[in-house]
Image: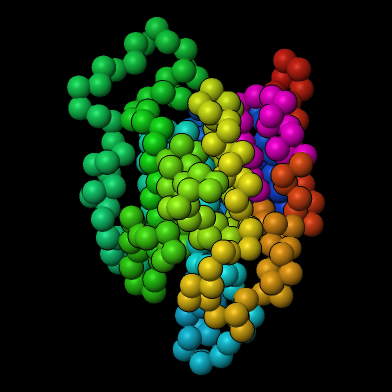
Amino acid sequence: HGGKLAATGRSVLHAASSYRDVYLPCAAPASYGDEGGGLMRALALHTLQHVLVVTRQRLRAAQKGTSPADQGFTRPTVLVLLPFRSHALAFVKALLELLPDAIEQVENKARFLSDFAQREGEPPIPRAKPEDYRSMFEGNTDDCFRCGLRLSRKSAKLYAAFYKADLVVASPLGLRLGVGGAGEARADSDWLSSIEVLLLLHADVFLMQNWAHVARVLSLLNATPSETRDTDFSRVRPYALDGLSGRLRQTLLLAAHEAPELRALAMRSCRNASGRVAALPEHGVGCP
């Protein structure tokens, strides 16, 4: 798959494959498409590879009847935050196209495509609008959604329950409503305790929505669960038991431009022990 990627996508994939944090505050909206830079396909490939490795480890241990300490408290390991349904559609489409041939069925695919496609009667974007505007706002711009994806040996399932999902795609608002607020009786965020890869794409748009939702979600990541649920503690990694999962989480933060909130997030919330890769834009030039 790497040979099909544009240079920008290959560079980001190379950096992501090191499992260091990646801060890219010069990812223009057009660069996510295959013709503009291939970022979406590169990031989908990275997350799919991670989920497949985790899934194969789990299945191999079940076959052998062993109990290695290779898991977190809950099943989901990847969280992808996106501002609009159109972006989620592009990400999931790219990921599904990269699924191995052994996965023959994708449950609820038609439902997902219908829910995230452009709404009927939506007027087209005027051609007079700039290219970056059209790249950003083309398609379904609803900003409240969440969807889990579960992979097994021969099938994938969209709209999987969070605790049974491997990967969750959501908007900050959709996720905030899903986990509830602090002190609420229905608040449930334990499934965020074992996130190993976090993607924040088009993060500059989050600033135009409600940054408090992003801050709330980030505060819940890799926290110790409030309930044991079905956790097999003999298989939980020692660093997770010690409350250090956040130091091993990879965060990929991509935005069209810099902002104080984004830089603060990159400097304070991205605490990966493996380090950080940052591509800072040069004035009037863009990313090197």
Q: Quadrant of residue 17?
A: bottom right
Query: On the rendered structure, is 241 left or right of 71?
Result: right
Q: Residue at x 24, y 41 (%)?
A: 114
Depth check, front residue: 235 or 56? 235
Depth check, front residue: 227 or 25? 227
Q: Look at the image and name its color scheme.
A: rainbow
Q: Is residue 104 above or below residue 117?
A: below
Q: Residue at x 48, y 55 (%)?
A: 188
Depth check, front residue: 241 or 272? 241
Depth check, front residue: 191 or 170? 191
**Which quarter shows the C terminus?**
top right
Q: How many marks?
A: 0
Q: Position of residue 240 (x, y in %)?
A: 68, 68
- Span of residues in magenta: 251-267
Q: Position of residue 8 (x, y in %)?
A: 62, 38
Q: Residue at x 77, y 22 (%)?
A: 282
